[in-house]
Amino acid sequence: QVQLVESGGGSVQSGGSLRLSCAAPGVGFNTYRTAWFRQAPGAEREGVAAIMPTGLTAYSDSVKGRFTISQASDKNILFLEMNNLKLADTAMYFCAADNRFHVVPGTLLNPENWRYWGQGTQVTVSS
């Protein structure tokens, strides 16, 4: 079974930073791709960042240059370092994992391409 448990969310002022963590004890990072998604109230779930077993990363344009996805492979933990947070970053953040690698180019950050999900952690950015 793949279990994903997010933590690290909270409230922060605009311009501040947070680091999210996702514990993934059943996920071998050498055989799974992992990612972060977010969903604001009334909005669709959107991809934020993904990392492949090779270390290759992908980011949405809205967070590029501000967010960094990384892994602590020896501890099966996925991170999302978020800097210069904006009001628009307010959302529930989810980590995801999948061990299928036949993904249509350009669709890696589409939610339908991810099989396993955590329960989410809330991030609220205020002015």
Image (cartoon, helix red, strand yellow):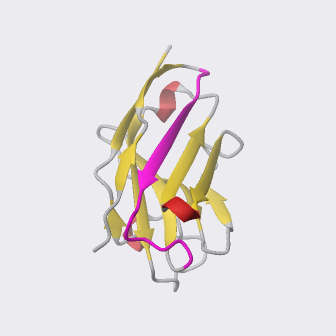
Name the residue: 57% across, 64% down: 73
Indicate yes or no whether the magenta region holds residue 96.
no
Name the residue: 52% across, 86% down: 102
Q: Main secondary structure of the magenta part?
A: loop
Residue that lies at the very extreme toward the front in this rendered image: 74
Residue 4 is drawn in which quadrant? Answer: bottom left
Residue 51: x percent and y percent?
A: 59, 64
Residue that lies at the very extreme toward the right in this rendered image: 65
Residue 24, placed above or below residue 105: above
Residue 11: x percent and y percent?
A: 42, 23
Name the residue: 43% across, 32% down: 90
State which region is magenta: 15-30
Asked whether 86 or 3 is in front, the reply is: 3
Q: Is residue 101 visible?
A: yes
Name the residue: 41% across, 55% down: 23
Q: In the displayed structure, does residue 106 sit left or right of residue 22?
A: right
The number of numbered badges drawn on the structure is: 0
Residue 63: x percent and y percent?
A: 61, 43
Residue that lies at the very extreme toward the bottom in this rendered image: 102
